[in-house]
Amino acid sequence: MPRFLIASMGPLPGEVVRSFFLPFLPEGVEVEVVSLHGRPRDEVVEVLRRADVVIGDHTFQMKIDRELCNAMERVRLIQQPSTGFDHIDVDACRERGIPIANAGGANSASVAEYTIMAALTILKRIPYAHERTRAGEWPQWELMDMGTYDLQGKTWGILGLGRIGREVAKRLQGWDVEVLYHDKVRNREYEERYGLKYRSLPRLLRDSDVVSLHLPLTSETRGIIGEAELRMMKPTAVLVNPSRGELVDEEALARALREGWIAGAAIDVYSREPPGPDHPLVRLAREEPTVNLLLTPHIAGANTDARQRIIRFSIENIIRVLTGGKPLAVVNM
């Protein structure tokens, strides 16, 4: 009977992870799952030397660096159960011929729904309205004076037209909005399909009422939204970031919100997670309750439906490789 060793870098116990596999395992195939989360480095290295497959850490705390990659003498696949994989040394894995697969867009629809919901929440000033009403107040006229807005008739700028960016564009059909996008490669197919208009980054920022970020974290995208870019945006504009915290200069964004360079922001990701009370955006939300800011704990792509799709895809991809097939959603080959 074939028996394979799977090394899990995430925080779930090995037996819990193994239980996910049971409904999908072909007859005659057995797996052992060893959880490495939080274990001493030498133990991690030893298990990785014997592992057939590695499941990456969805919390990004257990990094896979060059040393760990070099220890993977038998590994056929690193399956990351999320969209992001910037905690894995992609170059080292490529050099050793180890494919890395991510979740293959299993949570793209979830993030797209969150993005549109978050933008509407800020346009309507829902967080402030909720807090004041919950406190027994009636801020109707105050909110009207502050300004609350429709999405209809606005211009939405999508920064990054990958899987999630395309899902946002798809879901904006019928909202009576003009949709702009910027990506390093023009996509004329989706321009035609969804009526998108390509713009340079500066022009997209200047023309958009809502800007949403859907980029991977790379050396090119790190800090792509800084003070200069925030000052390009309209004072009535909204920024939504469900992608990577490091895409945005968080100190500059806090200043932009405090000083009114832009009208609001919805943030689901942070340069360090959890962000802590001293994080500039958390501190701003506590000190300036009228600031139009929505903060959520990295949940855009982590709802129940998305998690089930991610687990199923990841397990099926692993079994595909263990039974001689080629992995799907490979990001480094």
Image (cartoon, grey):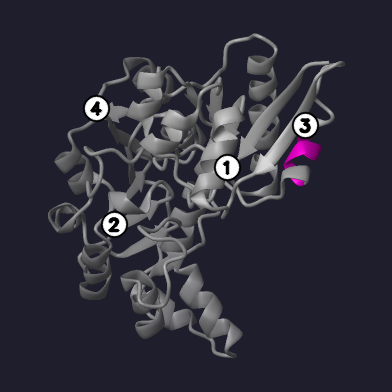
Question: Quick check: 184 above or below 126?
Answer: above
- The amino acid marked with disc number 1 is Ser
Which stretch appears magenta?
16-21
User: Which secondary structure dominates the residues rendered in magenta?
Assistant: helix
The answer to which of marks 1 and 4 sits earlier in the sequence is 1
Q: Nearer the viewer, residue 34 or 78?
A: 34
- The amino acid marked with disc number 2 is Ala
Marks 1 and 4 close (CB-CB < 8 Å): no
The answer to which of marks 3 and 2 sits earlier in the sequence is 3
Q: Which residue is mark 4?
A: 184
Q: Name the residue at 54% across, 90% down.
A: 137
Q: Find the residue positioned furthest to the right.
A: 27
Mark 3 vs mark 4: give the one in front.
3
Question: Quick check: 187 above or below 157?
Answer: above
Marks 3 and 2 close (CB-CB < 8 Å): no
The answer to which of marks 4 and 2 sits earlier in the sequence is 4
Q: Secondary structure at mark 1?
A: helix
Dot 4 crowding, Cα within 10 Å, few <14, some 14–19, many 20+: few
